């Protein structure tokens, strides 16, 4: 009997993680059945639809349509709707990725229904419980049955938390599976861009910015400081800033003025974003996944945070954690512009084969 897997995706950073797993599942259609569940946590075309199209993710089998609301409303709605689906047809495995509210909500439902819970990108810890994602990671991992990890630190965190060695598997990084796959598409020249080619034609040198963490954008004093720093950087080099809906909402009516040297855009599609980032001088971000992707692309990444759940990107990659201090950030930018940026190496198993390793292991496991 083929095992039935429910794959959960809800918010933008999930889509690039689920895409390579689906590709691998399709390649092995004799081995597994799967259904895709989209919670609807992200619902705009720019935050969701365009990723399905570009990353060739099939239409979801189930769409939970939870859009918006507070975190508790989101989690509660997802739980109720996902429970119905799992009760109507119980899968053998629920596979969740990453650390968003959808990950947490579906993990709890699966575990309570005694369905084998698999967490991809498990074990990452920033140590900062002010981040909603950190709470999602800790709670999800506390009930996960099979852990797939991207880096050594995650393995050690899970061991320290008392999880059995046999349940933890260091398989690499599915987001990098996706990155390498999409880079090939990009290099094959078959991709249609909306704005990245035009922007690259207009600006020979540029930096890219993404900022959306509640810690940086929900408090207007922090947001004003972030913008002040970006405005200063943009005196040296133009910045391209696709603005996340959370950041956009907080900027609106705040009186915080963004310099004209910063090109403000709506959220970009995966391919437009990748096309910009691969030729950027640097990126300023507070995202999780971008720290991983820039390490593989070899692009300097200044992460506007005090901690990271992805320490390998700092230890081995091009990532630097920069607290919000204008002088030190300016020094880093000067260093980068002089060509003296931090060089990195690609972490172990970030080689495009993580999804294949995951499915090999799931096939070998004798799940009840
Ligand atoms: C979520 C994830 C975060 C991830 C980010 C990437 C959690 C706790 N956080 O944060 O880890 O880095 O996604 O984008 O799950 N909104 C729209 N349109 C959309 C989606 C959201 O307008 O398509 C609005 C929402 O209504 C809300 C705000 O943006 O007001 C934030 O959305 P939410 O899903 O709560 O979390 P994110 O900040 O996007």
Image (cartoon, grey):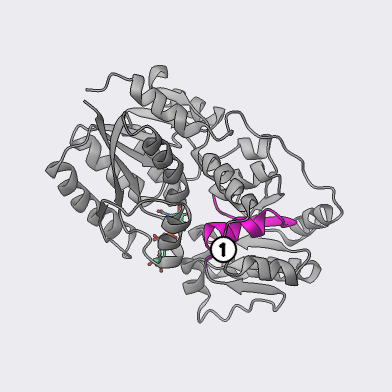
Residue placed at 70% from the left, 66% from the top? 229
Report which quarter residue 99 is drawn in. Answer: top left
Residue at point 39% right, 29% down? 359
How packed is label 1: few (under 14 Cα within 10 Å), some, or many (20 or more)?
A: few
Q: Is residue 325 in view?
A: yes
Instruction: Read off the residue under disc 1.
Output: 192
* Residue at image location 43% in from the left, 49% down from the top: 14
Query: How many numbered marks does the figure carry?
Result: 1
* Image quarter hosting the C terminus: top left
Residue 328 horizontal side relative to residue 346, left or right: right
Question: Regarding ligand 1, which quadrant of the image does it lie in?
Answer: bottom left
Q: Nearer the viewer, residue 337 or 57?
A: 57
Q: Nearer the viewer, residue 44 or 143?
A: 44
Asked if residue 146 lies in the magenta stretch, the reply is no
Q: Can the viewer see residue 126 in this picture? A: no
Q: How far from the left and from the top, in percent, is residue 241?
A: 62, 67
* Residue 65, image x, y percentages: 27, 61
Residue 275: x and y, percent?
64, 57
- Residue at left 57%, top 39%? 310
Q: Which residues are magenta?
A: 267-288
* Quadrant housing residue 279: bottom right
Task: Tell me: residue 77, above or below residue 127.
Answer: below
**In front of the other: 296 or 187:** 187
Residue 90 is drawn in which quadrant?
top left
Residue placed most toward the observer, 7 or 188: 188
In the rendered image, residue 89, in percent from the top left (x then y), is placed at: 15, 41
Position of the N terminus by quadrant: top left
């Amino acid at each position: 009997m083929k095992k039935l897997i429910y794959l959960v995706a809800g918010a933008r950073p999930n889509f690039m993680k689920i895409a390579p797993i689906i590709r691998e599942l399709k390649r092995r259609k004799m081995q597994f059945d799967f259904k895709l569940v989209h919670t609807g946590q992200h619902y705009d075309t720019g935050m969701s639809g365009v990723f399905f199209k570009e990353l060739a993710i099939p239409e979801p089998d189930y769409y939970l349509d939870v859009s918006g609301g507070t975190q508790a409303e989101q989690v509660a709605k997802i739980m109720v709707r996902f429970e119905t689906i799992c009760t109507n047809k119980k899968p053998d495995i629920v596979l969740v990725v990453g650390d968003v509210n959808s990950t947490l909500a579906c993990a709890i439902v699966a575990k309570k229904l005694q369905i084998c819970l698999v967490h991809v990108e498990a074990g990452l810890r920033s140590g900062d419980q002010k981040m909603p994602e950190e709470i999602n990671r800790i709670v999800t991992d506390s009930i996960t049955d099979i852990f797939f990890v991207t880096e050594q630190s995650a393995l050690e965190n899970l061991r320290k938390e008392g999880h059995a060695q046999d349940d933890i598997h260091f398989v690499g990084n599915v987001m990098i599976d996706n990155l390498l796959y999409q880079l090939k598409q990009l290099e094959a020249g078959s991709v249609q861009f909306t704005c990245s080619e035009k922007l690259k034609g207009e600006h020979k040198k540029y930096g890219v910015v993404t900022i959306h963490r509640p810690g940086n954008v929900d408090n207007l004093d922090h947001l004003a400081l972030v913008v002040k720093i970006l405005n200063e950087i943009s005196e040296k080099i133009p910045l391209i800033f696709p603005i996340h809906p959370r950041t956009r909402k907080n900027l609106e009516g705040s009186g915080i003025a963004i310099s004209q040297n910063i090109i403000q855009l709506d959220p970009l599609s995966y391919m437009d974003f990748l096309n910009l980032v691969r030729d950027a001088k640097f990126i300023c971000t507070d995202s999780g996944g971008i720290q991983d992707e820039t390490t593989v692309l070899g692009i300097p990444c200044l992460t506007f945070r005090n901690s990271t759940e992805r320490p390998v990107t700092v230890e081995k990659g091009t990532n630097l954690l920069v607290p919000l201090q204008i002088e030190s950030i300016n020094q880093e930018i000067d260093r980068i512009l002089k060509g003296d940026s931090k060089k990195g190496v690609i972490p172990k198993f970030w080689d495009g084969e993580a999804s294949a390793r995951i499915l090999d292991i799931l096939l070998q496991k004798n799940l009840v």
